[in-house]
Amino acid sequence: MEQRVSFITLAVTDLGASRRFYVDGLGWEPEFEDPEEVLMFRAGPLTVLSLWDRAHFEAEVGAPAQAGPGVVPITLSHNVHEREQVDGVLADARAAGSPVVSDGEEREWGGYTGYFADPDGFRWEIAWNPGPVGQLVLPPVGNTT
Amino acid sequence: MEQRVSFITLAVTDLGASRRFYVDGLGWEPEFEDPEEVLMFRAGPLTVLSLWDRAHFEAEVGAPAQAGPGVVPITLSHNVHEREQVDGVLADARAAGSPVVSDGEEREWGGYTGYFADPDGFRWEIAWNPGPVGQLVLPPVGNTT
């Protein structure tokens, strides 16, 4: 098996709310959408982020664990070129209606990051990571993906 | 906020078990690792998959919801060029020690996919998707990322 992630699929409870947040709020452009089932975005050169209606997810993959208190045990990060951009993206997420936005923090590994939640509580980390692995994920300046 | 995922981070309970599955079992090569905390893999041109020790995840992001019965409400897909490759990758996952492997199935949207679970139960979908969005995520034949 090659080491490659193609689609990242998140089970969502209300596709309309997801659309208002990602499309209307953050300004993302769908690659494909079916209002009854799924909303897909390009999220990298060979990567698609797919928001899939929870009922459809459940029918194919199985019933998700009850959310209860606590976060889903994954995060997605969005890395930026400059430290200063972290606070700006967190502010954009707040303006787009994110229900939970943290302040940026210095991290012991040398970066600066903060988190926001999307309408389903999935955590995005906005990260400035000046280390070697952090540099791997940055597109050329001026490219958006 | 540009529409871009940089890191996909999964909270894992036993990094040694993760390493045995992904490195020893599937043959993946770490990009970075700290045996006490994290194991990272390149997973696309600008994408890193990070397996992060659950205690560290919890200290920074918050306590994950109890797993209980049911799956984590996300999947990662690994798309392949040819329909016939799906069953082969599922067999590789079984040989690598995946605790749950489904058979491939025809999907109503025209593809053929099956799922396996990693040691923490995170679901990977192995997918042949001949549609336009499916083609977007495929590397040139011969490239592994």
Image: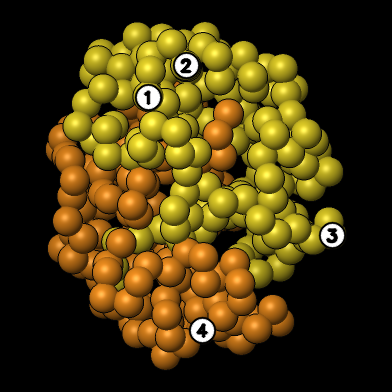
Chain colours: A yellow, B orange
Identified at 22% across, 26% down, the residue is A131
Q: Mark 4 sits on what residue?
A: B104
Picture residue at 30% right of the left edge, 62% below the top: B145
Residue designated by label 1: A81
> Residue A102's image quarter?
top right
Describe the element under mark 4 as helix, strand or loop. Answer: loop
Please give the chain letter of the residue carrying mark 3. A
| Mark closer to the observer (3, 4) | 3
Residue linked to disc 2: A85
Residue farthest along the front direction in this orientation: A142
Give the alpha-carbon distance from disc 4 to disc 1, as whole Å: 41 Å
Of mark 2 and mark 3, the one earlier in the sequence is: 3
Name the chain letter of the residue that bears numbered label 2: A
- Secondary structure under the numbered disc 3 in the rendered image: loop
| Residue A85 on image: x %, y % | 47, 16
Please determine whether, in this image, residue A42 is positioned above or below residue A107: below
Give the alpha-carbon distance from disc 1 to disc 3, as whole Å.
Answer: 36 Å
Mark number displayed over residue A36: 3
Helix, strand or loop at mark 1? loop
